[in-house]
Image (spheres, grey):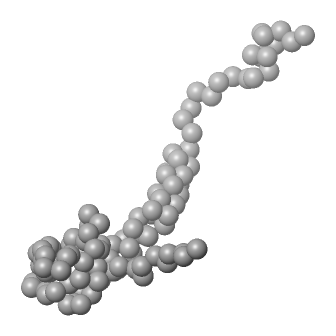
Amino acid sequence: MLDPRMLLALAGQPQQGEGNPYGSLVLMALIFGIFYFVLIMPMRNKQKKLEEFQRGVKAGDKVIINPGILGTIEGVDGDEVQVRIAEKLRIRVLKSAVAGLQGPPPATENK
């Protein structure tokens, strides 16, 4: 059986000095680089594509407004668009509220 004092003796003396500061600096830079390429860069690209889409909306586009409202753009006036969401119901929203184009309607199965 091993004596606890023997284990402490085998462990050796605790280090008194500081480690190499460049090692931790390199590790921090590596972690930041991973975060940049995994999180920040894709988010920037997605934001650029959305801004380009919002600048290029035109009348007749079927869009989704940010809270999930589906509609068709009736007119564009500066930073605002007029969206028809029902037969006789039109609303004005900012271009920044347009989240994207409507996809094709979901296919329904008839049995």
Residue ID at (50%, 64%): 38
Question: In this picture, is 25 found above or below 99?
Answer: above
Q: Foreground: 90 or 58?
A: 90
Residue 63 in view in this figure: yes
- Is 68 left or right of 22, judged from the image as shown? left
Relative image position of residue 9 (x, y in whole percent):
77, 16
What residue do we see at 9% from left, 84% from top?
Answer: 78
Q: x and y percent of residue 30 in the render?
A: 53, 58
Percent position of residue 13, x then y: 69, 22
Quadrant containing the N terminus is top right
User: Which quadrant is the C terminus positioned in?
Assistant: bottom right
Depth check, front residue: 106 or 54: 106
Query: Residue most toward the right?
Result: 1
**What residue lies at 42% left-to-right and 69% top-to-bottom?**
41
For residue 20, what is the image quadrant?
A: top right
Q: Residue furthest bottom?
A: 59
Q: Which one is nearer the viewer's eye here, 101 or 8?
A: 101
Q: Is 9 on the left-hand or right-hand side of 72?
A: right
- Residue 50 visible, this orientation: no
Residue at image coords 24%, 78%: 71
Say whether residue 94 is left or right of residue 109: left
Please state if 8 lies on the left or on the right of 51 as rendered. Answer: right
Q: Give the answer, above or below, for where 3 lies relative to 63.
A: above
| Residue 76 location (% of width, % of height) | 13, 86
- Total labels: the figure holds 0
Q: Is 84 placed above or below 7 here? A: below
